[in-house]
Amino acid sequence: MQQKRIIISAGGTGGHIFPALAVAGEIKERFPDLEILFVGALGKMEMEKVPAAGFKIVGLPVMGFPRKPGLKWFKFLKMLMQSNKRAKQIIKEFKPDLAAGFGGFASGPVLRIAAKKGIPAIIQEQNSYAGITNKLLSKKVKKICVSYENMERFFPKEKLVFTGNPVRKNLTGKLPGKDISSEFFNLNKKDKVILIIGGSLGARSINNAVLNNLEKIRKSDVKIIWQTGAIYYDEMVQKTKKNKPSNLFIHKFLQQMDMAYDVADIIISRAGAGTISELCLVGKPVILVPSPNVAEDHQTKNAKALESQNAAILINDKDIHDQLFDEAFVLIGNEERLKDLSENIKKLAKPDATKRIVEEMIGLIK
C-alpha cells in the first residue's frame, strides 16, 4: 500500500465530517504509508475540524444549490466553475489513486472530475433519504456505502454496499468510565445527568426549549450539560447571563464526546443518521427531537424507526417547549424504563461500519 494516495471530500456539518474523519483515522492506523488529503468548502467547519484531527485539507469556493430562482443562481454557477477549476488542479497535483465522498458540497466537483479522469471513486450516504450531491454522483462512482435498507430507490442496486455509518473511534471501544468522565465535567459520579446535543452547529428550537424551561431546570436535582452549537453559543450565554441555574453547564462544542456520552443518564438529541449511529453504540437512553427542516423529513423517519423498537423516545419539534423537560425528568427517575431503552438501542449498533468502508476503499485501490 506504499505511496498510494486518497482524496477524501466531506463537509458542511459534523454529520459528514466525523464519519470521514473516522474512516481517515482507520486508514492511517492500518496503512500508515498511505497519504490522505481532505477537500472541503472554504469557510465551513471542516476547515477547522480536519486539521485539528491531524489531516491536511484544501478548500473549494463552493456553495449549495439555491432552492429558489434568483441572483443566488449566478453566484452558485460562478463558484461552481471556480470549484471545478480548483478541483482539477488539486487532482492533477495530488494524483490520487482513489476519491471518496462523504457528503457536502465540495464532494460534487472533486468526485465528478476524479471519475472523469478514470480514478476510482466511492461515496458514503449516511441518511435514509439520499442527498442531492450523492444522487448526482451515483452514476459515476464504483461503490456506494449505505446505512439503511431499500436505498436502491436512489442508487443503482449493483453498486450498493450495506455498511452502516462510521463513528468516532473513541466510541467503538470501552468508554472511559463514569468516575473519569464525571471528574472531567467537575461532577459527582452520583449526580443524575442529562446531556443535550443539537448537532455540531446547534439546534435553535432545542436551545429555545432550554431557555423556556430554566425554572424547571433550576428546581430539579439534575445536572444539565448543554451543547448549544457554535452558531448559538454567544447568544445563549447572553440570554442566560442573569438567570442561569447553577445545575446548567453551557458548552459551545464538546470535544470529548466519549466522556459526555459516558457521564449522561439521558441524552436529548436531533435524529441525524450519524448521531443515531453513535447513540446506538453508546447505548444510553435517548429522547430524539427530529429536525423538521431536512429533506423528506428523514430525521422523523429515523426517530420513528427507533421508537417502534422501544429504543428511543420521540418528541416532535413543535411540542418540545411543553413536553421535553417534563418527559426527561420523569424518565430519569424510572430505572426500569431507562434499562429497557438502553438495552434496545444497543441492539441496533453497527460497530464494524468504519472497518467495512475502509475495506471497500482499499479494495478499489488494489
Image (spheres, rainbow, N blue to C red):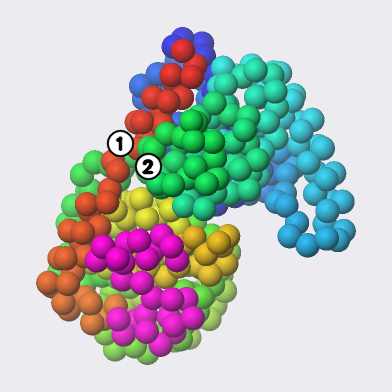
Q: Earlier in the sequence, mark 2 or mark 1?
A: 2
The quadrant holding residue 304 is bottom left
Residue 321 falls within the magenta-colored stretch: yes
Task: Kindly identify the residue that appears in the image at 76 percent across and 37 percent down.
Answer: 83
Q: Nearer the viewer, residue 294 or 267?
A: 294
Foreground pick, 142 / 91: 142
Image-based side of 64 in relation to 300, left or right:
right
Residue 27 lies, with reference to residue 318, above or below; the image says: above
Q: Which is more toward the observer, 187 or 220? A: 220
Q: Is residue 266 left or right of residue 129?
A: left
Which residues, given as a range, are shown in magenta?
A: 300-327
Predominant SS along the magenta part: helix
Asked whether disc 2 touches disc 1, contact meaning CB atoms under 8 Å apart, the reply is yes
The residue sitting at 52% across, 64% down in the picture is 297
Q: Is residue 315 above or below residue 6?
A: below
290 with respect to 342 (left or right): right
Q: Which residue is mark 1?
A: 352
